[in-house]
Amino acid sequence: MSELVKICPASDIAENSAKSFEVGDAIIAVYNLGGTFYATDNECTHGAASLADGILEDDIIECSLHFGSFNIKTGAAVQAPCFTPLRTYKVVVQDGHVCVNLEQTAAD
């Protein structure tokens, strides 16, 4: 059975921003989009750059290294030079904490 991993208090991630977190062997980016939380792999699929350091506009995160972009809800690459999608993770807010299931995608 898949388990939720408590990441941080929801209040630690300001609205319309992102932060990266080390969770076991993974480094994920958690986004607060107008009070709704999303999570993806933190590393850009085009180059070794932290997406949490990128620019978040609506549901698109732009990588700060080569300016490729991804949809944080689906993981889809939406702007070159990024073509490989990101892995997304199921996010739940429980008792005021952001929790992520590393075994379930956001679509599951």
Image (spheres, helix red, strand yellow):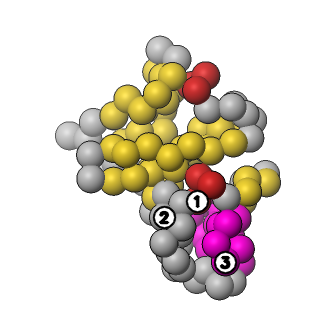
How packed is label 1: few (under 14 Cα within 10 Å), some, or many (20 or more)? many
- The picture quadrant where one finds residue 15 is top right
- Real-space Cα distance between discs 3 and 1? 11 Å
In this view, 101 is above or below 76:
above
Residue 107 shows in the view: no
Quick one: label 2 or label 3, which is nearer the N terminus?
Answer: 2
Q: Position of residue 41 (x, y in %)?
A: 46, 58
Q: Which residue is mark 3?
A: 66
Q: Which residue is mark 2?
A: 43
How packed is label 2: few (under 14 Cα within 10 Å), some, or many (20 or more)? many
Secondary element type, mark 3 = loop
Q: Main secondary structure of the magenta part?
A: loop
Q: Answer whether labels 2 and 1 touch (C-beta < 8 Å).
A: yes
Q: Is residue 53 shown in magenta?
A: no
- Real-space Cα distance between discs 2 and 3? 13 Å
Q: Which residues are magenta?
A: 62-79
Question: In the visual, does 87 lie left or right of 23?
Answer: right
Residue 103: numbered disc:
none
Q: Position of residue 31 (x, y in %)?
A: 61, 44
* Dot 2 amino acid type: Glu
Q: Residue furthest top?
A: 95
Residue 91 shows in the view: yes
Q: Which residue is mark 1?
A: 51
In this view, 79 is above or below 75:
below
* Dot 1 amino acid type: Leu
Question: In the visual, does 56 lie left or right of 65?
Answer: right
Q: Position of residue 6 (x, y in %)?
A: 38, 29
* Dot 3 amino acid type: His
Residue in view at x 69 percent, y 31 percent: 14
Quick one: label 2 or label 1, which is nearer the N terminus?
Answer: 2
How packed is label 3: few (under 14 Cα within 10 Å), some, or many (20 or more)? some
